[in-house]
Amino acid sequence: MFKKVLIANRGEIAVRIERGLRELGVASAAVYSDADRDSLHVRLADEAYRLGPAPSSLSYLRVDKILEAAERSGAEAVHPGYGFLAENADFARACVDAGLVFIGPPPEAVHLMGDKVEARAVAERAGVPTVPGTGALTSVDDAIEKAPGVGFPLLVKATAGGGGKGMRQVSTLEELSSAFEKASSEAQSSFSNPSVFLEKFIERPRHIEFQVVADQNGNTVHLLERECSVQRRHQKLIEEAPSPFVDDALRRRMGDAAVAVAREAGYVNAGTVEFLVDAQRNFYFLEMNARLQVEHPVTELVTGWDLVRLQLQIASGEVLPFEQSDIVARGWAMEFRVTAEDPFQNFIPSAGRIRFLRAAEGPGTRNDSGVYAGFEVTPHYDPLIAKLVVAGDDRMHCLSRARRAVREYQVDGIATTLPFFARMLADERFIAGDMDVSFVDRHWMSEIAVRPSERRSELLTVALAAAAAEDGSRRTTRRGLTAKASAWKQMGLREQVGNRL
Amino acid sequence: MSREKKFHTLPGGEGFVVELAKEDAGYVVRSSSPPFVASVVRSSAASGSAWSVIVDGKSYEAKVERDNGEILVEVAGERFRLGSGPERQEGATAGRRPGRCEVKAPMPGRVVKLLASSGETVTAGQAILLFEAMKMQNEMRSPQDGVLVELAVQEGQAIQVRETLFIVRSD
């Protein structure tokens, strides 16, 4: 095992990796931007090195600075987390060239899976069905020519994409050129690569993905599925394992397909094979994420295997401690992404200081967080601040635990997705496991967010009482609280946003 | 000593009058319509405004924020928007006069592209500009039919929260 590992990331995932390292007796070296000097991941690390100013292009995306920090720290390996440079093949290659172990797949596999068109070809070679689509497009005219062959509706997607960035849905030929330009420009700003392609849009599919792990000795095993259909504009909000839609037969077929894709790609370490599944249980390879996923904790709670620990063991040359037949689901787990976004205002990001924070605790409850009370959420980075993960004996038990935990969780000073979860957990369709990737877009703002509560008059009383008290306290402490009070909507007034972009 | 506080719900304008009294641990809020007596304390003196509210033996937690004269209260997954005073006043909403609608940046960001030009006749829902914030691009749309009387920003410009983006005037 390594003696020291550098974490090329920030926020909750850097904290998660630090925990894994400390449990193995490995020293952790964190990196930080000026905006993150006081972050949890810096405080909890054994060592910390400054990268540069707040914008990620000047800090967390600076390969040279990160390698410099690795050298100064004497780390033997680099864990990239997710986002930033995690799926950047040049970074993986630069680590290897600098004599560092990249805790992830080999640079060739990162490259192959990072390119959506190449990845589709890998899946096809592995005999796994893919969504009909095109290769990388050369121009808007190329898109217009090929679109009718794919059929409408379709998606314009960045070849280097992920997380819904650089992606646009198009219903008619007329919308295509504007969508092409937007997707391409977003792809350029997010991934420094404007290349896009077209893919047939499958009506109301579910998003179901399989966790795979592969060691350096050629053993590849999947750790069952996660259902991530509760998403908004391709950003996942709730994930669960197992999927309420997958039966044993489908699980076997999809699991085999996931392992086949990983093998064909020459994949090593932890990765995720994503599928779209239609109502008839046809599944299509979507993409492979060559990294640890945000939602990995649900797999950990259901299978009992610590994925960060496995990643470190695999990277240091150890053999997988299990075979496929050893992997069984125990109970049910769900993850709720607590993000600094206002669900009642169509998930507009909300920055500001967290003035009060009480995470949910208690039975079957895990909180993977990167923040604390007093922490300033800046608009520089991803709005994910914490992940609430709950486990239960079965789905109903898990749901009731989730309701209890969401009620306990209080974050004040910024808007968060917690009220969204409270309402989703009361929605009959979600309770029945009846959802697809368009569920939130179709039902949230227009219906669930505005549905009058049966408890409205009762809760209005509480709201009036709280408003009156706040108003009273405000007058008596005019110079203190009032001056500092920031509204949810008045985001990041202090931030020099111009820097970030 | 108690003070009277007046609130109204937004939108809707239901008016309420409550009595607020300071006590050692926090406040007592009384109302006759609807009838209730509430004990209200801040979660801790030093930090923020997560309030504990007890009404008729029932315990709640409420989050209170101010936004441009409005009071936002979140309790049990519900959000209430309240205004101070007994009822809604005409023209109280910032930036909005009859016929004239000012669209402001919802958060800090950057103008990627202008999709309409000053003086142009626009329709409700028409995309006026492309705005990028937190790495996502979104179209900012006209809230009403009318004339784009002012386009206050340029392509590439960095925008602060609440900065005016454009103004649409209906006839």
Image (spheres, helix red, strand yellow):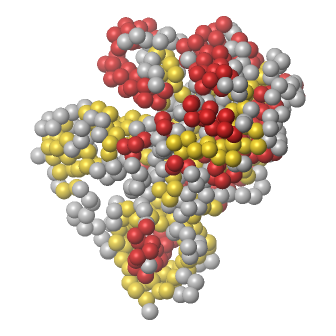
Does the rendering let one see residue A242? no
Is B35 on the left-hand or right-hand side of A278?
Answer: left
In the rendered image, which quarter contains the N terminus of chain A?
Answer: top right
> Which residue is pictured at 29% across the width and 50% down the height?
B163
> Which residue is pictured at 24% across the width and 41% down the height?
B153
Does the rendering let one see residue B84? yes
In the rendered image, which quarter contains the C terminus of chain A?
Answer: top left
x, y percent for residue B29: 49, 81
> Which residue is pictured at 56% across the width and 61% down the height?
A374
x, y percent for residue A456: 49, 63
Kindly indicate the quadrant of the structure image that contains residue A184: top left
Q: Is residue B123 above or below residue B106?
A: above
- Residues A198 and B15: in front is A198
Is A378 on the left-hand or right-hand side of A44?
Answer: left
x, y percent for residue A18: 72, 44
x, y percent for residue A40: 63, 52
Is A118 on the left-hand or right-hand side of B121?
Answer: right
Is B93 on the left-hand or right-hand side of A10?
Answer: left
> Which residue is pictured at 39% across the width and 55% down the height?
A493
Q: Can you name the residue that lies furthest to the front here?
A: A72
- Residues A307 and A389: in front is A307
